[in-house]
Structure formats: C-alpha cells, structure tokens
Amino acid sequence: GESVGLHLPTLSVQEGDNSIINCAYSNSASDYFIWYKQESGKGPQFIIDIRSNMDKRQGQRVTVLLNKTVKHLSLQIAATQPGDSAVYFCAESGYNAGNMLTFGGGTRLMVKP
Amino acid sequence: NAGVTQTPKFRILKIGQSMTLQCAQDMNHNYMYWYRQDPGMGLKLIYYSVGAGITDKGEVPNGYNVSRSTTEDFPLRLELAAPSQTSVYFCASSYSTLSGNTIYFGEGSWLTVV
C-alpha cells in the first residue's frame, strides 16, 4: 500500500549546526504534509506543515521543503540545540484517503554538546 | 489548556483481561483517533471517529473496540488482552477540514500485557 518512509533512522549533529531530516512518500495524491517531534515519553508535537501547492515553508528555526517531482519532504532545523533531540516523524494525508494521516517510521535526532 | 487527556498513563494487564483506555478532548474537535506505537516504530491508526456516533476502522483494528457517544470522549476498549497488544497508545483529535488536518496528540498510555 501507500507509505511514507525515512532515509535515515538516526542523525547525530553538533550543537549549533544545521540539521536536515529527510522523508520519502509514495502516495502521489497526498496534498498535506506534517512534521512531528516526539520527545521521550511524550506524545508527538506538531512542528510545521505544508500543502502540496507550496515548495517551501518556514517557521521559527525550522523549514520544510517539498519536492513533488521526486515525492520527497525534508525538515531543516537551523542552529540545532540540545532541546531538539527527539524522534521526528513525517506524515502525509490526502482527500482520497479521507484526510487520514499516514506516518513514517521516524528519525532520531541526537544533538551533541 | 488541557487539550487531549488520556488515562491511565501506565497499565499492566494479564493475558485475557479487558480494559478501557480513556480519552477526552476539550477543543471541540470533530475528529478523534487512536494510534498505537510499537518500540522504534511509527504510529499506526487503530480506529477513528469523524463525529459523535460515528466510528471507523483504521489500519490495525483487530482486538479493539471504540465508541463515540459524545464529541469530547473516545474510549478504546481491549476485550481479551494479548501480548501483541503491548504498546504505547496515543489518542488524538483534530478539526474536520479539507484544508488541512493538524492532529493534536495526548501524552500516551503505556500498556504491557503479560
């Protein structure tokens, strides 16, 4: 079936560096994408979203890029901080799936001081 | 701001026992969901509801039941607990909208079946 997946299960970065977390999706009909952050022992927290009519969206220290041609999504975190250490999930949804979110497997981001 | 509230936080069940995970949201959201998350894995949808009185199966509904008698509450019932149901369960809610469907999650319920 359609799925959302991630290229790297674990990403280790130095504090202050920029982080890039990647995600591939296979459902070409998906029109809404979300990045979630999940800290240990907690539920996923919304970070940023993007609709399929956009290529880029910026938030505070975070940027999401969407490449519909190759069905690729990325999350960029600027000046990574220890508090950014968590598991990051991408998720996608589309009207043809009843707007239900499909989650990828997650990438663990580890920030080294 | 309460948001999505789940209880209990932790529970140990014996094989064959039954229990209900409670979920309540105070955001007047129409959509509610139950997900399970196995160690190191993403979230899988168990059941969802688009409004009071309406429930639908998700990706992994076997062994579970739900009800939605009110907009606020969406309990998840395990009738005959099995070791395969050892997992972390997340309840979530969202507005019903075609323009996006940002989902807000509860803090999770850790369930162990022994």
Image (spheres, coloured by chain):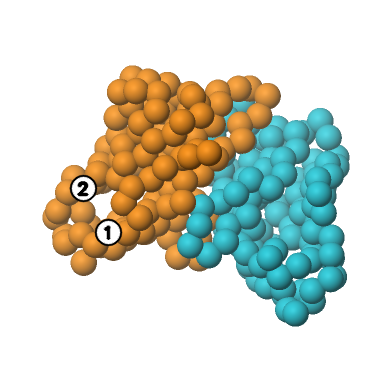
Chain colours: A cyan, B orange
Q: Is residue A113 above or below residue A23?
A: below
Task: Tell me if I can see residue A72 in this picture.
Answer: no
* Parent chain of label 2: B
Residue B11's disc is 1
| Residue at figure coordinates x 16%, y 60% from the top left | B15
* Parent chain of label 1: B
Q: Quadrant of the C terminus of chain B?
A: bottom left
Q: Residue most toward the front?
A: B1
| Residue at figure coordinates x 37%, y 20% from the top left | B52
Left or right of B44, for residue B74: left
Q: Amino acid at mark 1?
A: Arg
Q: Residue most toward the left?
A: B16
| Residue at figure coordinates x 72%, y 40% from the top left | A49
Q: Position of residue B12 (x, y in %)?
A: 24, 62
Label 2 packing within 10 angstroms: few (<14), some (14-19), many (20+): some
Residue under numbered circle 2: B19
| Residue at figure coordinates x 29%, y 30% from the top left | B67
Q: Position of residue A108 (x, y in %)?
A: 63, 67
Q: Position of residue B62 (x, y in %)?
A: 29, 44
Q: Amino acid at mark 2?
A: Met
